[in-house]
């Protein structure tokens, strides 16, 4: 299985052993993110790292778990409510002159978005590489959902995200 | 007798505290997550911590393959602008975690396109928010949780456990604002856990998120409006 190395910047203690052992110089970057284009997936850096800050990720990810239709429907109902709560909180934020209420509604909007994203993930859209995502992007390419839709973004995503199935 | 916080699992032990739970004032709040006294319930003795979800039978239906063509479960229904915005911002996060900054930016662009098309709420206000969180707690989460249990879907049970707790703390804060106004927020900061959405009010965020247990640096401080 082809892999590539990923560094967790929170764990990296800059011992720099990865620089010594990488045969292609993929770990030596100015932003500390391992260069995926160069990385050959040999795994030497991950084994040499004293902090366990480097892990190996497979290039091709397995298919998502299949979701039961009844579960997805109930999840979507909940999700629609969370989106409305986010919207309402944003509207209150815009209108209020009260700093406390402003910050509270900012928190409520952020919190509702995060909860909604979690639901969306479990409702079938966990991975950018998944079949669901791929089919959605394909659909938007063929039939843009409205005026001013950034079709070139969809085009580029379909080019960049591998879909092997 | 012991009482457990339904949001974060903190246990109040009457014996250790040398004070009856019922003798605590109504203004008493959970020392870990600040949930009010009313969100505590008696702790039933049993193995492990009190988790609200029952353990489902480990039966997975079907092959488990989502990507086989023709499943059609999620992709086909008409989704609202809000749902699509959330789907795209979530996929942007997925790209971020995989160190794919260009794809992340593209999904963000799509998320913003859809976000700008979410219709305004007609009665946007704290009372309306309170009725929506109450409905999620009374109907939305119990229904999803039951279905996920029946279908042995652990992933969905997990988002029910987190989401319900987060919604409960949202509900508490909204109702507190309705009752008291914003005085309780005057000299304190508001923090949001960037992983599960838990909201904490206080000077510094908790060491571990009471809901999803990530460390404090995962909390984001909600800044006030920039003047000028």
Image (spheres, coloured by chain):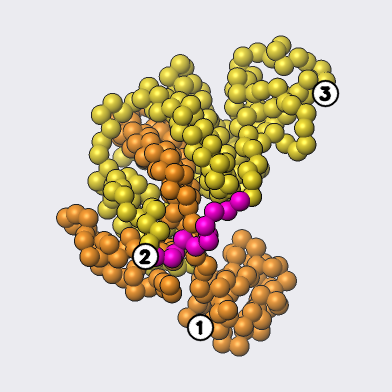
Of helix, strand and loop, which one carries label 2? helix
Residue A23 visible? The answer is yes
Residue A102 in magenta stretch:
no
The letter of the orange chain is: A
Q: Are marks 3 and 1 in contact (CB under 8 Å)?
A: no
Query: Mark 1 — on which chain does it sit?
Result: A
How far across and how far down the image is residue B149, in percent?
57, 41
Q: Give whichever of A74, B28 is nearer the camera.
A: A74
**Residue B123, numbered circle:** none
Residue plotted at (46% across, 17% down) = B180
The letter of the yellow chain is: B
How far across and how far down the image is residue B221, in percent?
50, 42
How far across and how far down the image is residue B46, in percent?
77, 32
Res. B140 image quadrant: top left
Res. A47 image quadrant: bottom right
Query: Mark 3 — on which chain does it sit?
Result: B
Image position of B25 with respect to B61: above or below: above
Q: Residues within 10 Å of mark 1 (few under 14, many from 20)?
A: few
Q: Are marks 2 and 1 on the same chain?
A: yes
Q: Is residue B60 left or right of residue B119?
A: right
The residue under label 2 is: A134
Mark 3 to mark 1 CA distance (whole Å) = 59 Å
Mark 2 to mark 1 CA distance (whole Å) = 26 Å
Q: Residues within 10 Å of mark 2 (few under 14, many from 20)?
A: many
Mark 3 to mark 2 CA distance (whole Å) = 56 Å
The residue under label 3 is: B16
Residue B61 in magenta stretch:
yes
The residue under label 1 is: A38
Mark 2 or mark 1: whose residue is earlier in sequence: 1
């Amino acid at each position: 299985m082809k892999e590539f190395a990923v560094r967790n910047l929170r764990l990296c203690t800059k011992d720099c052993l990865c620089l010594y052992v990488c045969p292609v110089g993929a770990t030596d970057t100015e932003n500390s993110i391992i260069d995926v284009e160069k990385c050959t997936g040999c795994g030497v850096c991950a084994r040499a790292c004293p902090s366990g800050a480097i892990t190996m990720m497979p290039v091709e990810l397995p298919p998502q778990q299949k979701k039961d239709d009844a579960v997805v429907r109930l999840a979507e109902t909940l999700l629609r409510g969370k989106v409305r709560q986010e919207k309402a909180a944003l509207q209150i934020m815009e209108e209020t002159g009260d700093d406390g209420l402003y910050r509270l509604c900012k928190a409520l909007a952020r919190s509702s978005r995060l909860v909604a994203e979690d639901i969306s993930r479990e409702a079938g859209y966990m991975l950018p590489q998944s079949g669901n995502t791929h089919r959605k992007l394909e659909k938007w390419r063929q039939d843009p959902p409205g005026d001013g839709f950034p079709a070139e973004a969809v085009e580029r995503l379909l080019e960049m995200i591998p879909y092997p199935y | 007798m012991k009482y457990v916080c339904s949001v974060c699992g903190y246990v109040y032990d009457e014996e250790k505290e040398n004070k009856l739970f019922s003798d605590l004032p109504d203004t008493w709040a959970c020392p870990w997550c600040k949930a009010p006294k009313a969100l505590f319930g008696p702790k039933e003795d049993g193995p492990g911590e009190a988790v609200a979800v029952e353990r489902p039978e480990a039966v997975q239906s079907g092959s488990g393959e989502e990507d086989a063509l023709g499943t059609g479960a999620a992709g086909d229904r008409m989704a609202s602008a809000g749902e699509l915005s959330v789907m795209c911002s979530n996929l942007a996060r997925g790209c971020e975690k995989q160190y794919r900054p260009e794809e992340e930016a593209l999904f963000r662009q799509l998320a913003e396109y859809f976000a700008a098309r979410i219709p305004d709420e007609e009665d946007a206000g704290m009372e309306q928010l309170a009725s929506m969180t109450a409905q999620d707690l009374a109907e939305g989460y119990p229904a999803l949780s039951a279905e996920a249990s029946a279908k042995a879907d652990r992933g969905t049970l997990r988002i029910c456990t987190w989401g319900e707790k987060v919604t409960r703390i949202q509900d508490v804060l909204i109702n507190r604002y309705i009752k008291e106004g914003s005085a309780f927020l005057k000299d304190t900061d508001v923090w949001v856990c960037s992983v599960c959405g838990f909201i904490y009010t206080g000077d510094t965020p908790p060491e571990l998120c009471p809901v999803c247990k990530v460390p404090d640096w995962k909390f984001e401080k909600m800044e006030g409006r920039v003047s000028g």
